[in-house]
Structures are given as structure tokens and as C-alpha cells.
Image (tube, rainbow, N blue to C red):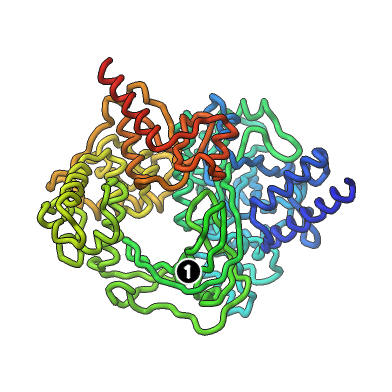
Amino acid sequence: MRAEIDQLAAKIEAHRRAYAQGEPLISDFEYDALEEQLRQLDPQHALLQQPGVAVTGAAKATHAVPMLSLQKTYRVDELLSWIGAREVVGTLKIDGNSLSLVYQYGKLQVAKTRGDGQRGENVTAKSRYIDAIPAQITDDRHLEIRGELCCETASFFALAAEMETLALPRPLSPRNVVAGLLGRKEHHQLARHVSFVACDLLYHDDGALPTTEMDKLAILTALGFALPQPQLLTSTVAVEAYLEQVREKIAADDIPLDGAVFSFNSLAQARALGNTTHHPRGRMAFKWQGETAVAKIDDIVWDTSRFGIVTPVAEIEPVFLNKASIRRVTLHNFANVKLYKLKRGSEIKIVRSGEVIPKFLSVVREGEGELAIPTSCPSCKTALADDGVRLLCTNRDCPARQLRALLNWVKCAAIRDLSEKRLTAMMALGLVQSIPDLYRLTRDDLLRLPRMGERLASRLHAAIAASKKLPPERLLSGLGIRGGGRATWLVLLQVAPTIEALFALSAAEISAAEGFAEKSAQQIHQGLQARRALLDELLAVGVEVIAPPPSQSGRRSGDKYVISGALSQPRAFYQKLIEEHGATLTTSVSANTTAVVTADSNSTSSKVNAARRLKIPLISEQDLLLCLEENAQKNKNT
């Protein structure tokens, strides 16, 4: 047993060192599983009491207050149990390198890495190149600001290009390049490509202290530091909505993220609980389970999105991740393809976390042949623009952009029987070019489509007509504004409860809403203004914004359903149906979930397994429909 423990501890320490040097060998989930295995074998092992690795060689700096790690969970029910009835503050979990900044008399005295939690490396000289770290602040007290150094996607490719001109090794990814820069003994100027996000504030002298986490973060904002987009969360529904919002941001891939951090808003509560030798008890990180695999690229295809972004997608030899067969993997952008020389035959490491689109992580073996990067849009043949990271089709009338915009609307409006194939046929016949055209279609127009009979035409025409009435968050999502997912609109609708009020918000007012960085707020504001004419046209053809129906206060109010696997209708159809009956469709199973809807009660998916563990009912589509219909009848009779 002792030999097994020692061997496992040595493996964990090796992985910690690789991670600290910016060259992780396994995924976070795989690493956490190793730590949990050691915890089961030897709960008091010394390695579990240190949050990082001891530093060697570089100048050292001692932490007056230890820099601890965070306790982690991959289960929503465990997170909600930890939160209980407390107010918490949700923040993005930046996938970077921890840094401590010590200020006194308003001037930066030292910048130091976490190291082993007791001592870190002195990186003050490198920090001087980072614009997000001010050399002077307006507070004269002896204080410490802790946060994360990270490299945003756009900055990463600029950094990679500069490193290439300096004949330096190619960086692996935005997630590990920071550690490599911090360890460099020369070319300190490269650190200017790095950003700093402040997460915590400590005072080392007497004076008034903030009483809440939100107050503390407000002080950091006033001092000029960027924050990890905090939101005050006062209910279970708010926590689950925040997790959905974080998933949207992870998918956008603009900044390296790997989950969310939740902190007690009451600092008195957090202090009362104290710390372990490893983590504070008043904070918890939530991450989605991720599985990795190595896959071989058969081909790279380029898809034009509704925003005009031409994205490379790898078609791979099938591999299984999270019990799903994966055949397509996003390669993020053309800069990735160029930097890593991705081509047919390349063997790549991929990851799938939280049941979202699988992503490229790194190259295992380079393929042969030449890179094949398009110079014109694969759909309309317009010459592509290059912003340094992405290839862009600037033709607003591009058929692919129009089709993707229509598909997004069909999904958000939950229009049954309207597939991509039928939309493509409509466009080919000149029946539809934009979203409002859908509501100008007649039954005779639909009969012109291939394999369209009288009965199907009537059903499809009725489905389109029924989709005219939409709650505001789904209508806004259907407009296709970049950075505006359903969770985003639900937050903003708390600030501006009507469509008109929301469109009237300035960028500054959006930024003032919890959780919106200035850049995101500007993007959303510009997107709203650009879609004003589209909204007016939709309203003119009969689309209506509806308030939540009366049944929202009925018996099903507060019920939460989760869907696992494919059903006979698209997820958007069931989301609309569930919401119309006053319930909620969520993405994660927790103790508060009413039921999990699945077509396979013998499934071993993570959601079904979580339902079994929590003793939550597994129901079929028919069970769900019956349940909702029975409730509607009860509400009608009361």
C-alpha cells in the first residue's frame, strides 16, 4: 500500500511541475481524479496540503498570507448543497496562473507567483510590461491584490508571431503560454501580451474593511483592475442560469476559462468557516467533467457562420468521449490552423467538457502535405478578410450567413418540421432570404418544395404561424447578436424588462449590469442597434413579444426538467413547451431537478447517472407531455 501511495504521489508531483512549466500532460479532470485517488488512500498526505509546487532557482518571495487553491466540484447538486441558503458571488474561473501584487503607499512593491502557496517567484520585473497591472494606485494602504494572469485568444496569436520572429519555440496554447513567459530569463517584453484579472483583495494594516464580496470587488474596480465578471446570486435558479452563461462564454473561446468560482458574499460567514491547509471553505470552483482523446484528421472543412466567421472544422476518425461518438471537432480559427500546421493526417488531442462541442487542444503528430487555408468564402466566393485571428466573409448576402441566421431563428422559435434541408430548398426557390420572409410564406409557397404534400404543407404553415408569439429572451436570441445567448438576455431583462427598454440601453448601462465587461457590453449594444431594423420588420409581419403566461404562477411553477440524449423533437421544442407551462429546462442535474427526460432509461450518461444517484425520476417524452397536460387541466379547473 505504501509503495502504491508513494508512486501515486510522485506521479501527481510530476504533473504539477509540468503544469507549472506550461506543459500539462493530462486534462484537469484526469489530474483531479489522481488527487482524489490519493485522498482516498491517504487523506492526510503532505502533497494534498500544498496547493502548488515549490519553486527553485528563481528569486523567491514569501506570502504573508498563504495563497491557497480552491476546493472543486463537478456536480451541481454538491455545489448547491454547499451554497445552501447563502448569497454567493459567481465569477469566471480564469484558466491562467495565479499572481499576487503587493502595494504600499500606492506603489507596486512586488509581484509574485503562487509557487507552493508559502513562497512564490518574484516576477516584478516582468509585471512592469503588463498594462493591466498598474505601477501606482490611488489607495495608500498596505494591500495585496490577487488574481490570474492569462492570455486572451487574440493576444496569443500576436505573441506567437512575435516569438516566431525571435526564433523562440512555438507556444502550445493560450492556457499554458503564461507559465512559459513567467519562467523566461530573457525577452521579458513578451509579457505585454498577457492580461491580469483581479479576484481578491487583502489588507495588511488597520482600517475599515469591506463587509461583502461585492463591496471588495467594487474597490478593485475603483482601483482600475479588470474583474472576472462577477454576479451576485441569491437563488438556486440564479446559480444555474449563471452556469449556463459561463458555458456560453467558454464556447466563445475569447479568453481561457475552465469553469466558475462561487464565493460567499458575506465575508463574516467566510471568515467564520476559515481555511483548510489547502483551500478556503468560503469558496468553491465548479468545473465540467472533460474527457480527452487523440484523433486523426481525415479532412478540414470551412464553415461560414451567421456572423461571417469562416471556421475550420476537423472531420476525424470516430472516437468516443463522454459516451458519444465524435466525428467533428472545432479547430477554433484559421490562426490555429496556421500556427499548428493542421492538415490531413495530423494527430491531435481533443477534449469534450460539459457535453459541449469537442475542441482541439494540441498536436500529437504533424500530418504531411501542405496547409489548405481558403482565400474566398466557401459559400459565396467573396474574398476573405483576415483580422489576424479569424477569416471573415464580409458579404451580408452570403447564402451561408443567411442560412445560419435562419437556422438560429428556427431553433430559438422552436419551429417544428423546418429542417436545414427545407430551408435550403426555400432559399434556392427564392421563397426565403431573411427571417421575416418565413412569415410571408403561404401554404401554396410551401407546396413548391420537394416532397411536400398537402398535409405536411398545412402542418408546417401552422408551425410557422404558431412561432410568431415568443417570450423576449427567445426572440432576442433568435436575432443572432454576437455574445447574446439566452442567459445573457435573462440577466439584461432584469435591468430593462421590455424589448423597447432593452434596445434603449446604452453601452454604459449594459456594462453597469452585473457580469458584463465593457468590451462585451459594447459588442451587445452595437449588435442591438444593428438588429433594430430586423426587429421592426419582424414586428411588422406579426411576430409578438409575449409575457410569461398565467400558468407560470400555477402548480408547475418552480419545476425543473433536464433532457438527456436525443428525443423525437428538437430540444428547443421542449424548452418552449416546458416554459409555456411555467417550468424550467436546465442543463445540469441537481437535487432540485424535478425529473430527467430521456428516451433510454438504461442510459449511462452523466445526467442519467446523476439522476439515479439523487433518486430523481427518469421519465419519457410521453410522461412529460402527460404531466404538463394534467397540470394545465388542474390550473384550468382552479
Q: Give the percent coordinates (x, y) of residue 156.
A: 53, 66
Most extreme residue toward the top is: 638
Question: Which quadrant of the view contains residue 613?
Answer: top right
Please tell me whether mark 1 sits on a helix, a strand or a loop: strand
Residue designated by label 1: 315
Q: Position of residue 337 (x, y in %)?
A: 50, 73
Image location (x, y in percent) of residue 130: 57, 60
Name the amino acid type tagged 1: Glu
| Frontmost residue, 450 versus 413 | 450
Q: Residue furthest bottom?
A: 369
Where on the picture, by quarter, is residue 576? top left
- Residue at position x 69%, y 67% in the image: 184
Residue 103, x across and y down, in percent: 64, 47
Left or right: where does residue 57 sit relative to residue 416? right
Query: Relative to 414, is 86 on the left or the right?
Result: right
- Front-most of 259 and 464? 464
Residue drawn at 33 percent across, 65 percent down: 308
When the figure is inspected, residue 594 is found, relative to residue 37, above or below; the finding is above
